[in-house]
Image (cartoon, grey):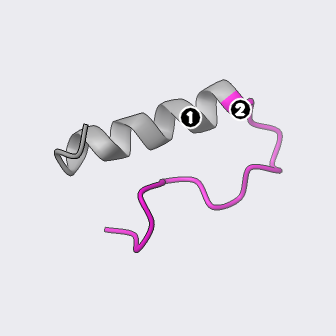
Amino acid sequence: LHDYPYDHFDPFVGESPARIAGDQVAFLRRVDLL
């Protein structure tokens, strides 16, 4: 797992903020923090 609770470290590759936020939520769910 990453050291930070996000799958995305590089939001400037053409992905929308909603997609990046969704990946962050998915990560939190996988590690049972949400």
Q: Which quadrant of the figure contains the N terminus?
A: bottom left
Residue in the image at 58% along x and 53% along y: 8
Query: Please, is residue 8 above or below residue 15 in the view?
Result: below
Q: Badge 2: few (under 14), some or many (20 or more) residues near its Cα, within 10 Å?
A: few
Q: Which mark is residue 21?
A: 1
Residue in the image at 31% along x and 44% along y: 28
Q: Residue furthest front?
A: 34
Disc 1 residue type (three-letter): Ala
Q: Is residue 7 magenta?
A: yes
Residue highlighted by disc 2: 17
Give percent across and percent down for residue 10.
71, 58
Disc 2 residue type (three-letter): Pro
Numbered-mark total = 2
Q: Which quadrant of the figure contains the C terminus?
A: top left
Q: Which residues are magenta?
A: 1-17
> Which image quadrant for residue 5?
bottom left
